[in-house]
């Protein structure tokens, strides 16, 4: 999937991974037995599977289900959606891991890692089986894809399994791409697996690079950006909103949320370790429409700023002390 296909709820298609031997599960592992290895095994068991029974080549997943999370029903008008994040969420959930806060947006795996202290952004980190691999692009600031590590190999390379890959080139819609793609696997060499690297076999034309690895946890927080802040983005923005993207400001995180029922976006900036009132802001603009901000001196958060944005691109951002950031026009849909 190309970068132009960034939509409101989704952050991209897929990277890929070399196939492991396929295993079939008849029941999901219990939460008490959750291990990265069990997640890796389940992911590998679904290499070659499509989005589900809605696909051009209909398949059932290895647990007998007709889709991965909402891969066949989470898009516009209840149709197929870009499902790379659906796949990893399905694997984690059926391996006994906590999935609170995860959505069809690949960026939610970065936020999950921030929420639960399991996001690894050091170039020295050694990825483990079951870790999510979060990809951005050198061409923008978006998160475009998420995959899952299925093996750490003796030569130092890693194998990853990724949903929603190898769909129809130049597909004209989210649904068209989603029904033509599948779970594919590729090996990332030892020299290209570090955070910050651009694997030569993971969509090099679009400049995909590894933003970080997120390790799943058996319990955690799907709402608070860091343990030091008692408020979470959904609590601030209100009922019906879910996190679809986030950006680290250093001492704070700015979150973009969406409410599918109202077609509205909400932006809130939350301090990571509140220690008193500081200059903060949250901003939101709708292309061809209104703009809002909430500058001021706050202890816990700036915002929420909320605007209706169905069918439009948005520009969102925030600031914390002297650090500010604003996205390009994105999350169009």
Image (tube, grey):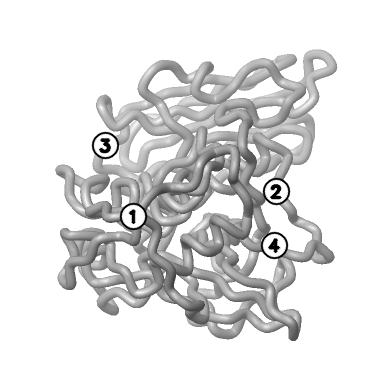
The disc at residue 119 is: 2
Q: Nearer the viewer, residue 57 or 207?
A: 57
Q: Is residue 59 above or below residue 102?
A: below
Residue 21 relative to residue 273: left or right: left
Q: Is residue 229 left or right of residue 238?
A: right
Q: Residues within 10 Å of mark 2 (few under 14, many from 20)?
A: many
Residue 305 is at least partly visible in this image: yes
Name the disc covering residue 128, or none.
4
From the viewer's perspective, is the residue at label 2 or at label 3 nearer?
2
The local secondary structure at tag 3 comes to: loop
Is residue 203 in view from this perspective?
no
Q: Position of residue 68 (x, y in %)?
A: 33, 53
Query: Dot 3: few (<14), some (14–19), or many (≥20) neighbours within 10 Å?
Result: some
Residue 76: image location, x then y, percent: 20, 46
State whether residue 331 is above or below residue 196.
above
Q: Say which quadrant the N terminus sits in.
A: bottom left
Give the SS element for disc 4: loop
Mark 1 vs mark 3, foreground winner is 1
Foreground: 265 or 150? 150
Mark 1 → mark 3, Cα distance in angstroms: 35 Å
* Image location (x, y in percent) of residue 127: 71, 64
Q: Residue at x 68, y 73 (%)?
A: 152
* Sequence-first disc among 2 and 3: 2
Q: What is the number of the mark on residue 310?
A: 3
Whole-angstrom CA distance, mark 1 to mark 2, is 28 Å
Question: How packed is label 4: few (under 14 Cα within 10 Å), some, or many (20 or more)?
Answer: some
Q: Which residue is mark 1?
A: 63
Q: Nearer the viewer, residue 82 or 162?
A: 162
Helix, strand or loop at mark 1: loop
Labels 4 and 2 touching (C-beta < 8 A): no
**Numbered disc in front, either 1 or 2:** 1
In contact (CB < 8 Å): disc 1 and disc 3? no
């Amino acid at each position: 999937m190309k970068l132009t296909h960034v939509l409101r709820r989704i952050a991209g298609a897929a990277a890929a991974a070399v196939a492991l031997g396929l295993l079939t599960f008849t029941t999901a592992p219990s939460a008490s037995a959750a291990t990265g290895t069990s997640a890796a095994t389940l992911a590998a068991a679904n290499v070659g599977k499509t989005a589900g029974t809605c696909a051009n080549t209909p398949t059932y997943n290895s647990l007998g289900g007709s889709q991965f999370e909402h891969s066949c029903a989470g898009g516009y008008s209840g149709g197929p959606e870009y499902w790379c994040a659906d796949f990893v969420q399905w694997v984690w959930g059926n391996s006994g891991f906590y999935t609170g806060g995860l959505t069809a947006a690949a960026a939610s795996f970065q936020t999950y890692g921030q929420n639960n202290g399991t996001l690894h952004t050091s170039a020295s980190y050694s990825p483990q089986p079951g870790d999510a691999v979060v990809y951005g692009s050198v061409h923008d600031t978006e998160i475009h894809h998420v995959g899952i590590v299925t093996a750490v190999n003796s030569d130092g390379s890693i194998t990853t399994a990724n949903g929603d890959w190898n769909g129809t080139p130049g597909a004209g819609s989210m649904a068209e791409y989603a029904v033509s793609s599948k779970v594919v696997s590729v090996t990332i060499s030892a020299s290209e697996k570090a955070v910050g690297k651009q694997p030569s076999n993971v969509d090099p034309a679009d400049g995909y690079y590894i933003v970080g690895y997120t390790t799943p946890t058996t319990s955690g927080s799907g709402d608070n950006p860091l343990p030091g802040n008692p408020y979470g983005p959904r609590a601030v923005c209100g009922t019906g909103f879910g996190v679809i993207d986030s950006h680290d400001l250093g001492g704070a995180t700015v979150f973009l949320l969406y409410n599918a029922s109202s077609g509205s976006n909400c932006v809130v900036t939350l301090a990571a370790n509140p220690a008193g009132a500081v200059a903060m802001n949250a901003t939101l603009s709708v292309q061809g429409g209104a703009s809002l901000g909430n500058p001021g001196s706050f202890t816990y958060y700036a915002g929420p700023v909320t605007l209706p944005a169905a069918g439009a691109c948005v520009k969102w951002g925030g600031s914390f002390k002297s650090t500010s950031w604003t996205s390009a026009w994105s999350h169009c849909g």
